[in-house]
Amino acid sequence: MKYLIVGLGNIGSEYADTRHNIGFMVADALVKEAGASFSVLKLAYYAEFKYKGRTIVSIKPTTYMNLSGKAVNYWMQELKIPLSNVLVIVDDLAIPFGSIRIKPKGSAAGHNGLKSIEALCGGQAYPRLRFGIGDNFPKGRQVDYVLAPFDREEQPELPSLIDHSVKAIQSFVTTGIELTMTNFNK
């Protein structure tokens, strides 16, 4: 069994620790825990490793957020991984900071990275891990908010939330989406 774990974010040091890059941060933690590392390959940073008898490929698209679907589609086709075995890690304004939600499918909810994946990979029926970043911003300042670092009071909580997300991904790979949702969507 092969799985494609996609961390969404933007490349470049100016985006490194921003809310919009939480997908990259979770993917980094997943790969680091496995003792693997990323290489630069076509359209993405790419890492491959085994976890409990399954092959996990993790990518961080180098296409920038709005074209993420290009990298996801390429690696799905290249590795012959079905959409049901793809898990996309994404920031979500509609979920409070400190919560994650795992879903088997859903709308892009205005997220350009998800819109791109939807357009290029065959619709909305792919699993995703939505990492809550909250919506604590003034009207019209959404872009500034998602492209800003986590607040000082949020930063101490990040390592345990990222670790919790890694455990959810490992659960998805070993026990499937339904059981993972039951155990992690609190």
Image: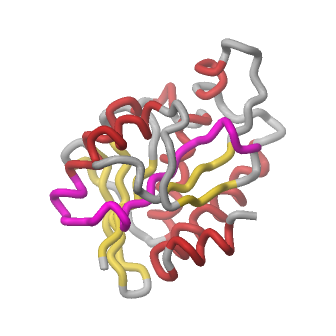
In the picture, measured across the screen, residue 5 lies left or right of residue 109, that is left
Please, which residue is most extreme toward the top here? 140
Judge whether 68 appears above or below 179 on screen. Answer: above
Residue at 67%, 15% in the rendered image: 141
Residue 4 at x, y percent in the picture: 35, 62
Percent of width and height locating residue 180: 59, 73
> Extreme right residue here?
153
Rendered view: 39 above or below 61:
below
Judge whether residue 92 is colored magenta.
yes
**Left or right of 40: which side holds 25?**
right
The stretch in magenta equals 75-96
**Residue plotted at (75% across, 44% down):** 97
Q: Residue at x 23, y 54 (%)?
A: 75
Q: Where is residue 174 in the image (x, y as percent from the top left)?
A: 48, 81
Q: Residue furthest bottom?
A: 53
Q: In which quarter of the image is residue 134?
A: top right
Q: Is residue 102 above or below residue 49?
A: above
Q: In which quarter of the image is the C terminus?
A: bottom right
Q: Is residue 140 above or below residue 23?
A: above
Q: Residue at x 64, y 56 (%)?
A: 101
